[in-house]
Amino acid sequence: MRRLALVVMAAGLPLTGFAQEAVIRIESKRDAEVAAAAARWAGQFDDLVTFPLPRGWTAIAIGPLSPEEAEERISALKEAGQIPQDSFVTVPEEGVVLTRVGDTVAPAKAVEAPAAPRPDLPAPGAYIRLQSVQARSEADAALSEWRKTFPEAGLAELPDGWFGVVLGPVDRAAAEAWLEVFKEGDVVPDDAFLSDAAELGAVVEAGRAPDLPAPPAAAAEMPPLDQVQRALRWAGVYDGEIDGKTGPRTRDAIKAEILAERLSTDPGTAMRELIARRDAWRTEVGLTMLDDQATGLSVMAPMDRLVFDRTERALSIYGPKDGSGAALILFSQPGGQQELLDLSGLVTALGWVPQPTRSIKPGHVLLEGGNEAHIGRAEGWVREGRAEGFVLIWPAADAQGQARIAAEMSDSFGRKAPAANDAATAQPALPGGGAP
């Protein structure tokens, strides 16, 4: 029985701890778009910061916070719908300067209107009537509950003396389209309906206009379904097979993404927007195709965060670049299921994937786990008589980024050329498992 010749000292793999504070990344913009976006978010958060990203992008974030505070706060903000669902916690690289938005961005100027409505009357437009209750105490409780889903919701005293939780004002066409989407997604009750401002009474607690785009004049063509499925998995709403086929899980994931981001009521338009966001993210994090000569493997990897370290027997090792805390190990050698099982034990023993959960199937092994410092994922396959795969090590503060990058790597993993390290792999292991 052959044993996988993975001979690496645990101390030899460079990993970086995180002494810096974390931030909650909520958006990234380029050039002229930064100021407007930052000013909009500054209306909701008084601890907003910006910092530079590679390739001319600028991050908009909440912080700085301790990693523990950041994880607690991002969960609460996502649950309340106050930040995008693809927001994530990250630790800026050493030397990156955080700039408070209040120091650089002036508040957006109010648009002058010919005749402003009375403060106690709803602004003109259509409103989605979410719920009506008779008592003020019930109304306050209802509003608090609805704001978990719609932070923009407000409360009006209706002409008949009841109280209504409302969402608006919205363009009438947009309101009609989104009301249908919300009902199909069971986000609002079936008896929710639209009202014009004139049908509402006095404002009891003001809301704000939600960002609900009007439907396009014509439905956009749906992108290829395999691209849609990959983008939906990147967004965290799809965990099915990437098979390019429509089915209940794919359809449900499309609906979930539309409800989560509210970019368009048209599925084709929404999916094109999602794919564009994924492409921008891939560029932002530096995902590029890595063709590794030693193993002959090819994979999309975050090379902006990695630097080649060394090869050892069946391994190619990439350590953290500029203190990123990331690492990547590619492995490949002749073998089968037993070699993958050997890898499982070695990865666990060296702490690359701490306290892992294991999924072992014929021809495939997956280990996932983490601790306070890092998250690890090891995935391997038996293909054409070879045991091959990767181990990704990523900072624990960026769990969402790690999940997205691991999915991209799993999708793109393949063989580019014969493995140059096969001769070295065939050599006997060094006594004591030490490095050469």
Image (cartoon, rainbow, N blue to C red):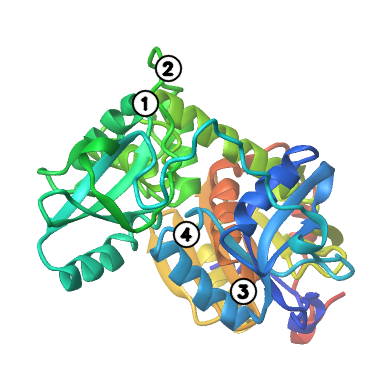
Tell me the distance, in whole angstroms, between the alpha carbons under discs 3 and 2: 39 Å
**Does 61 appear above or below 301?**
below
Residue for badge 2: 220
- Circles 2 and 1, Cβ within 8 Å, touching? The answer is yes
Query: Mark 4 = which residue?
Result: 82
Q: Secondary structure at mark 3?
A: helix
* Towards the viewer: 206 or 380: 206
Q: Residue at position x 78%, y 51% from top? A: 303
Looking at marks 2 and 4 on the same chain, the residue that comes earlier in the sequence is marked by: 4
Would residue 7 appear left or right of 42 to someone viewing this image?
A: right
Q: Residue 222, relative to residue 148: is it above or below?
A: above
Q: Please say whether residue 297 is visible from this viewpoint.
A: no
Quote the CA–CA distance across marks 2 and 1.
Answer: 7 Å
Q: Secondary structure at mark 4?
A: loop
Name which residue type carries label 1.
Answer: Asp
Give the residue number, with chain letter if any, for mark 1: 266
> Disc 2 to disc 4, how far (Cα)?
28 Å
The answer to whether mark 3 and mark 2 are in CB contact below 8 A is no
Q: Nearer the viewer, mark 4 or mark 3?
A: 4
Residue type, label 3:
Ala
Using residue 11 as the reference point, say whether residue 89 is left or right of it. left
